[in-house]
Amino acid sequence: MTPFTFISNIADFSSSFLIGVLCILMAFATILIYCSQQISAHGIASDTTPLNTLNYPIMIGFACYNFEGIGVVMPIMQKTGRKELFPMLLIAAIGTICFFFVVFGTVTYMAWGNFDAQIATEMLPADSVIVIILKVAFCVNMLFSYVIHVKPCNMIIEDWLFSPQTSNRVLNTSRFLVCLLGGLMAVLLAEKLDKFIGLIGAFLCAPVAFMVPAILHMKVLAKSTFSKLVDVMIVLMSILIMIFCGW
């Protein structure tokens, strides 16, 4: 994936990103089909509960982690041809993703209950050709989507550490180190992926998705008392999530 990060213009990946989206939809449909067969053959899993009192703080962190892609909104908007349509497209995209998350989480939980696997694909039959193709599709999606997701991180690091005159060799070295660090963390934390993502969601995604935008809106755009009150409530909610999930 590292060579792709050397390309600065993410607009070059617009077509490949669509391929990644198609891979996700294929995986989504395949897993739901397997889960539907499981429910049809064996019924709803016996260990399902309305509220998992042991791990629900991790779920809250996971919910916040769903906003991890919020950092790519501004770079994508900058490359959008008709920026006046972007808010409507953003709302439609968020609504669609929320619908998929709810359906996927509900169906897989009904089929498998509190399974111990870190990712859903580990619950599928490993010797199935369809499952093998599905895992390959996941890798293809990661290859195509990583560049867009890591772009804001590289931009921030390069703005802080380097000047506009910095050579491409130095910038590419920085991008390689970011990719290498991500790979090392993935290997070291693979067995505790759920807890790691939950903490990342609580401590990083919650402030980025809720606290910082609310503070900026309150300082720059909010005029009425009600708008400022809403911003304050969002900030307090973000702080509460950080404390509760970290505790």
Image (cartoon, helix red, strand yellow):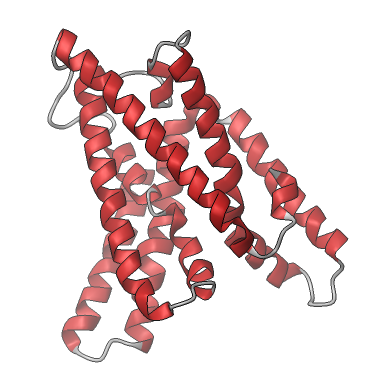
Say which quarter of the image contains residue 11. bottom right
Point out the image quarter for the C terminus. Answer: top left
Left or right of 181, for residue 216: left
Front residue of this view, candidates 148 and 59: 148
Front residue of this view, candidates 55 and 88: 88
Which residue is rendered at x = 41% and y = 48% of the image?
201
Point out the image quarter for the N terminus. Answer: top right
Front residue of this view, candidates 100 and 160: 100
Image height of 122 relative to 60, above or below: above
Image height of 32 relative to 154, above or below: above
Residue 85 position, x and y percent, is: 36, 75
Which residue is rendered at x = 61% and y = 52% of the image?
147
Left or right of 11, for residue 3: right
Front residue of this view, candidates 241 and 20: 20
Q: Is residue 113 visible to us here? A: no
Say which quarter of the image contains residue 230. bottom left
Say how many tags the image has: 0
Residue 236 position, x and y percent, is: 28, 65
Which residue is rendered at x = 63% and y = 66% of the image?
156
Left or right of 152, for residue 67: left
Q: Is residue 180 visible to us here? A: yes
Image height of 47 relative to 23, above or below: above
Residue 24 position, x and y percent, is: 42, 39
> In the current view of this chain or complex, which residue is farthest to the front?
15
